[in-house]
Amino acid sequence: MATTTLESYASNTEKLPLSINFQPKSPTSQPDSTEKDVEKAVTSLDDTSPVQLEKPTIPALDWDDEGDLDNPFNWPMWKRMYNTMIPGLLGLAVTFGSSVYTPGYPQVAREFGVSPTAALLPLSLWTLGLGFGPMLGAPASEMFGRKVVYMFSTPISLLFTMGAGLSPTFAGLVACRLLGGVFGSPVLAVSAGTIQDVWPAKYRARGFASLVSAPFLGPALGPFVGGFSVMNKGWRWTNWDELILLGTFWIGSLFLSETYKKIILRKRAQRRGQELPPSPPASPAFLVKVLIVRPVQMIFLEPIVFFFSLYIAFAFAVLFAFFAAFPIVFEGTYHFNTGVAGLPFLGIGTGVLLAAAMAIIIDKKVYWKKLAEHTAAGTLPVPPEERLYASMIGSFGLPAGLFWFAWTARSDVHWISPVLAGVAFGWGNFSIFCSCSLYLGDTYGPLLGASAMAANGLFRYTLGAAFPLFTLQMYHSLGIAWATSIFGFISLLMLAVPWSLYKWGPKLRAMSRYKIT
């Protein structure tokens, strides 16, 4: 709103195409309507009463129409695939960096004179650093867009990875690994937003399964590549493996297009010479609330978030516990060398791929059918519980794989049996994660969903960092069978989570303190 005094108003009236006659009128004469309006405006003012002159309201920016070619939903398929594939590969490389180190930890223990458990700290701290993704990536993405996050956070991670490879001290190695994970983590947080930008809800599960399977494949590939590097070049070469892989995919990010609607529209308005509506950046207090305070609140106050986050975090933590347990099994029991001992992790990777394929099939055969039914009946949106089929099926894969591994990983049983158990474990693990993530997103929507996934990540990476630190003692004290069986019994208890939410999810959603679907 603009203000003006009487003097400024009078000076402005000189520019108007009016002829104002202040000569007295006869009692019978009536001023015309224009004179009436001006006299009314002038006489209603005094030196202390400003006139409030409204500026035209600037309309909010939006797409021109449904077929707007700047809308990522309308991009050619190759462009949408490229902008999905590169973030996924960056996520693969960042999570690859966590596990590629593990074959070299015995060499690290010897070189720096630390215990084997202490030598696993660089693995745990990289994993812990990945939990900072939402806190770094979300505000940067909100202000500058998705592409900037991919382009500028990754090189910092590369520098710290180089520092880890050159570090002359154990403390320097630990610090560089932590910071490498911290600055690599934003790509994991922002990539989920990219999926929502590029793929309509009908196709989102496909894009999500394809994107998220890449970060799950990274931990499976890391020990395989790192094992041969350690055997032939030494532990420091595991950092060069990460540097080469992440650096290669980062080059691909230079050719990404911006996908965030807000940034696309503002840049387009500037090119067109349009006046931009006010859009102040989110305040620090708002970001702290969304990314730190609210996720912690949701963990304790939202049963849906708590149980799903705990379930996913446990499954993820067991995966990271295997980075310490697999060498005990395949090097100790089956006498594989360091390089070959990384190959069994490919079984977990195979399970991830199978789960991604299953999620896509279920989405097409089941969710699309439900979407069509609700569209025809006018009862949209589809209940979020329709996203849970993959997790309900996959919930059996987790305990099956763990008990299978526990009681066949012995010298009188062929090594292929525990490898196949890893396939079942990987299939169940990823099925649960993919389905539950879609469920949280559909339940809480974009903003609350970001907080729910931040809570999930907080749980997931904290447990993932902690489990490897007690795995060695656990397996040496209890043995392979019972140590793994403990994980199996816990997974049996948690098996009920997706089934219970499918049945009672609507009631729990109705009880939520937040306004949700």
Image (tube, rainbow, N blue to C red):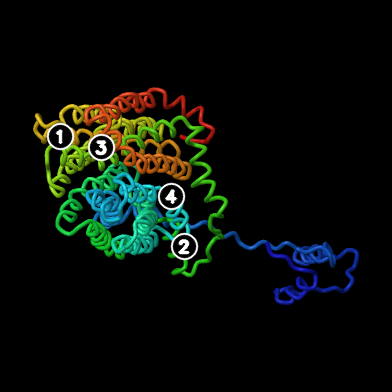
Q: Circle 3 sits on which residue?
A: 359
In front of the other: 229 or 139: 229
Tag 1: residue type?
A: Leu
In front of the other: 123 or 290: 123
Q: Earlier in the sequence, mark 1 or mark 4?
A: 4
Specify whether 453 is left or right of 122.
right
Tag 3: residue type?
A: Ala
Let me know if residue 511 appears in the view: yes
Spatial distance from mark 3 to mark 2, Cα to Cα?
36 Å
Comparing labels 1 and 4, the label whose residue is closer to the camera: 1
Q: Position of residue 262 (x, y in %)?
A: 45, 57
Comparing labels 1 and 2, the label whose residue is closer to the camera: 1
The numbered dot on residue 134 is 4
Q: Circle 2 sits on which residue?
A: 266
> Would you identify the image quadrant in which residue 163 lies?
bottom left
Q: Position of residue 69 (x, y in %)?
A: 34, 58
Q: Circle 1 sits on which residue?
A: 420
Q: Earlier in the sequence, mark 3 or mark 2?
A: 2
Spatial distance from mark 4 to mark 3, Cα to Cα?
25 Å
Comparing labels 2 and 4, the label whose residue is closer to the camera: 4
Q: Position of residue 460 (x, y in %)?
A: 37, 40
Comparing labels 4 and 3, the label whose residue is closer to the camera: 4
SS label for mark 1: helix
* The N terminus, quarter of image: bottom right
Residue at 49% across / 36% down in the picture?
298
